[in-house]
Every structure is written in C-alpha cells, then in structure tokens.
Image: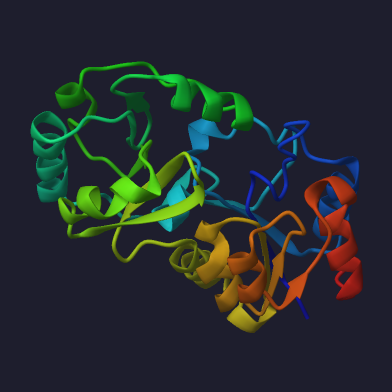
Amino acid sequence: MIKAVFFDIDGTLVSFKTHWVPDSTKRAIAILRAKGIRVFIASGRQLLAINNLEDLQFDGYVTLNGGYCIVGEKVIYKHSMPSEDMVSLVRYMEEQESFPCIFVHENAFYINYTNERTNEVFRLLNFPQPPSLPLREAVEGEVFQLVAFFTKEQENAIMAAMPHCEATRWNPLFSDIIPKGSSKQVGVDRMLDYFGISLEESMAFGDGGNDVLMLKHVGIGVAMGNAGDEVKLAADYVTDSVDEDGIEKALRHFGVI
C-alpha cells in the first residue's frame, strides 16, 4: 500500500506550457489527501521560489534537491555547500571565466548578474528573478545550492574547482550544483523517516535528470511522458505528459486512487 507520494514541480506537477498545475492533478492530490496518503514536494527549487502551486497543500517539502527538508515550520534536515568550495569558485570566476550564478541561502537567493540565458530560463519556468549582488557579497554566509548558467562543455572545468560538490542538470541552459551527499533520494529518506513510512510504501513522479536517483530509490518511480530517456529508463513506469493528465493516469494505473 502506498502511503507517501513525492512530486517534482517543473515539468511534473506544473506544465511548461501553462505554468500551472492541471485540474486532473489537483483532483488526484485531493483524493490522495482524503485517503490519508501523505503528499510531498521534491524539487530543486527553494521554498521561497515555489510560486506556481496555487493553494495546494503538502505534508512536507524536499527542496534544493534534497539539501533542505521542511515539515510545517520545522527544518528536519539541511546540508550546505562546503565553504572551501565557495572560496575556490569565487577565485575561478574572478580569474578564469565568469558566468551567471544564483546563490541560494536559507531564506534568500541572489544572482551575480543576468543575461539572455538567465532571462530565457526565468520565462520558461515563470521563476522569480533574484536580486542582483556583486559576486563576493552573493556568496557570503551559508549557501545551500547554486543554479549555475554554464554549458555542458564548460562543466568539467568548473566542477574541478569544486571537488566537494556535484552538478545535476535537467535543462541544457543551467546546472544545479549541490554538495556531495545531497540528492532528492536523501531528502525522501529523511521525510519517510520523520513520518515513519517505509521506502516500499513510497511513490515518486519526476521528469528531469535530478529525479533519476529518487525514481530508482522509491517503491514505485514514475517518469512523466515529457521526461528525457535517462529518466524514463530509471523509472518503473512511464506515464503521459503533465499536459495529458499523466499524474492522475499513473495513480489510477497503480490503484492508488
């Protein structure tokens, strides 16, 4: 019996076309909650940047790709970036090459500068544009995730400057950089432990590269029809796209609703 369902946001709960949650998904989540099944967010977004779920209610939030987990007002887990990697990154960006980067803190996020690439992503995701700060100011304090706007070809050189971190990419225009040991899989485990639910009783939906470990890990992993091939191969089941009622159809397929 499924007792917990985890949902990615962009491309899973929320359509890239409309920027909102389809009515079929809202109905499905309402049925899950009425049956006493816990529902959770599992996203790369920071809580402050979750602006597209309307009035939907969730039992907990796995944010920042598993690096920051929240139930109500309680933070049940957090894992920040190593300070030595932040120092190394600043040195690299000042001496080698600069690129736009969102520095995500516990209760704020900043960007060093914007360009056409960042503006395209903000439009695609209906993402709130962060305030701009000079690089050395944006990196001050505890940083939990970077949203770094560099290409796949640039990735190896940049990540060599951050040996205690790793990049996960679900869009060709940017990577989410997180500390090693963080992932949505880790966040799922923390949330299940908190609520006393077994892994076998969990289910997850996703469409991006940062969902792969989570989909492999849970009891039932479902890839959206709009997911990439890597994600579909990691899943137990491939449903229709977010715009074709994929979540509702998969939940009915497995008899969860």
Q: Is residue 174 visible?
A: yes
Residue 166 percent coordinates (x, y): 31, 58
Q: Is residue 227 left or right of residue 117?
A: right
| Left or right of residue 9: residue 65 | left
Which residue: 10% across, 49% down?
A: 84
Query: Splitting the image into 4 quarters, where does residue 1 fall?
Result: bottom right
Q: Position of residue 124 (x, y in %)?
A: 62, 30
Name the residue rendered at 27%, 50% in the picture: 80
- Say which of 94 and 15 sits in front: 94
Name the residue rendered at 45%, 26% in the picture. Answer: 118
Instruction: Tell me how many marks there are.
Output: 0
Instruction: Find the residue positioned furthest to the front.
Output: 153
Q: Is residue 227 above or below residue 132?
A: below
Vertical order, 98 against 4 (above or below): above
Depth order, front residue of 224/221: 224
Task: Identify the residue at horizontal 64%, vertical 43% (top origin).
Answer: 10
Query: Quarter of the image holding residue 39?
Result: bottom right
